[in-house]
Image (cartoon, rainbow, N blue to C red):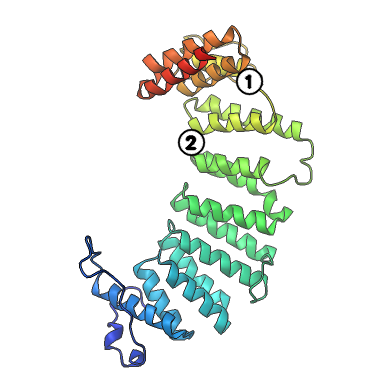
């Protein structure tokens, strides 16, 4: 169908005269009726009529596409479309081409990505409704498609979730092999992209252990170096600080493991650069805006974790956050102080 054309109402089409439309049920006097367009009311009335009749045909595919273009979150239209595709054994390449367009146009709509996943499952099952993974070449093409969509919206949750599903479901070393390079590309474009940091954690720590990754201590050390380098470039990057916490938790390491690294980020930037640089603990780069609120919070958590006399140091830092560095969360820091003192 032509998405730009304004189609005639189904009620005026002779080829739809055999379908009895079913209007949406509403009470006699709805408090806040939704002002649907006449085109949408007409299309959904006939959609309900088709569901009631149990029809599965080419015109059902045309009708569901029409409704989806009007409302891409219409779950019932997507479900009817999928069931009709299966019943007709429709060519999946044609449907995927349509989904390329719709995913590009409605990329923030969950139903688009869910339908795309179902199509990949059908392809994996050779057209049958199975849970067989799609071939690796199809999965590679899907990852390339997702990368293209992410160029438009680099933080779109549904797109990232779909990428992770493809990787985990197919679970082939060929796919995993280039994923960290992909993350690097995304972070080079925006090193504050929380979605990219989350995806890196998924690849490294939350998706199993692949060949060459059995030495988890080495993996953790490598990730600590990686995130420290990025924090050196942009200290006020909450995503990277969260990743640092995640790496330590994944490695079963205390927060104090990186205390030496964190401390320089909690004080004003020195006027003179250091002559010697600790490669294990890169300092804040030139022009860094310090003290870094996230670093102050991190160091306070280190002191709280240590306990004993260090708790008072944590309280001092929380007080500085409440009164100077992070006043918008003043009540929260005061709560942390009360909780620590009460222990």
Q: Where is residue 186 in the image (x, y as percent from the top left)?
A: 53, 44
Q: Name the residue under label 2.
A: 192
305 up-or-down from 192: above or below: above
Q: Where is residue 64 in the image (x, y as percent from the top left)?
A: 42, 76
For this rendering, which residue is in front, 51 or 91? 51
Q: Mark 1 points at which residue?
A: 258
For this rendering, which residue is in front, 256 or 47? 47
169 up-or-down from 268: above or below: below
Q: Which of marks 2 and 1 is in front?
A: 1
One can see residue 317 in this view: yes
Label number found at residue 231: none
Q: Quadrant of the N terminus?
A: bottom left
**Dot 1 alpha-carbon crowd within 10 angstroms: few under 14, some 14 to 19, many 20 or more:** many
Mark nearer the N terminus (2 vs 1): 2
Asked whether the residues under the numbered discs 2 and 1 touch, taking CB atoms below 8 Å apart as contact, a structural biologist would say no
**What's the residue at 25%, 64% (across, down)?**
34
Residue 258 vs residue 100: left or right? Answer: right
288 up-or-down from 35: above or below: above
Q: How many labels does the image show?
A: 2
Q: Where is residue 320 in the image (x, y as percent from the top left)?
A: 42, 13
**What's the residue at 65%, 76% (across, down)?**
128
Quadrant in the picture for residue 260: top right
One can see residue 285 in this view: no
Q: Tell me the distance, in whole angstroms, between the alpha carbons under discs 2 and 1.
A: 21 Å
């Amino acid at each position: 169908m032509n998405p730009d054309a304004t189609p005639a109402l189904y009620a005026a089409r002779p080829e739809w005269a055999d379908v009895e439309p079913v209007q949406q049920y509403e009470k006699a006097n709805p408090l806040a009726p939704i002002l649907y367009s006449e085109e949408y009311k007409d299309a959904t009335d006939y959609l309900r009529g088709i569901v009631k009749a149990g029809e599965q045909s080419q015109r059902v595919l045309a009708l569901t596409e029409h409704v989806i273009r009007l409302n891409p979150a219409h779950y019932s239209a997507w479900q009817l479309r999928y069931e009709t595709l299966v019943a007709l054994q429709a060519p999946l390449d044609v449907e995927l081409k349509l989904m390329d367009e719709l995913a590009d146009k409605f990329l923030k709509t969950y139903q688009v990505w869910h339908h795309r996943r179902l199509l990949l499952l059908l392809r994996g099952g050779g057209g049958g409704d199975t849970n067989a993974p799609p071939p690796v070449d199809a999965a590679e093409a899907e990852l390339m498609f997702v990368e293209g969509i992410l160029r438009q919206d680099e933080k779109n949750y549904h797109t990232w979730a779909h990428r992770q599903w493809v990787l985990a479901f197919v679970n082939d070393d060929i796919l995993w092999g280039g994923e960290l390079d992909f993350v690097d590309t995304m972070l080079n474009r925006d090193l504050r992209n929380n979605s990219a940091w989350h995806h890196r954690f998924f690849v490294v720590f939350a998706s199993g252990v692949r060949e060459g990754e059995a030495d988890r201590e080495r993996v953790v050390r490598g990730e600590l170096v990686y995130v420290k380098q990025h924090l050196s470039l942009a200290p006020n990057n909450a995503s990277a600080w969260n990743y640092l916490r995640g790496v330590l938790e994944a490695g079963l390491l205390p927060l104090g493991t990186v205390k030496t690294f964190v401390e320089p980020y909690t004080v004003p930037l020195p006027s003179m650069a250091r002559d010697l640089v600790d490669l294990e603990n890169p300092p804040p780069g030139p022009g860094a805006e310090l003290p870094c609120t996230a670093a102050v919070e991190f160091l306070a958590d280190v002191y709280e974790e240590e306990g004993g006399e260090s708790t008072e140091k944590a309280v001092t830092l929380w007080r500085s956050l409440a009164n100077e560095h992070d006043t918008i969360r003043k009540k929260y820091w005061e709560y942390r102080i009360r909780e620590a003192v009460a222990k």
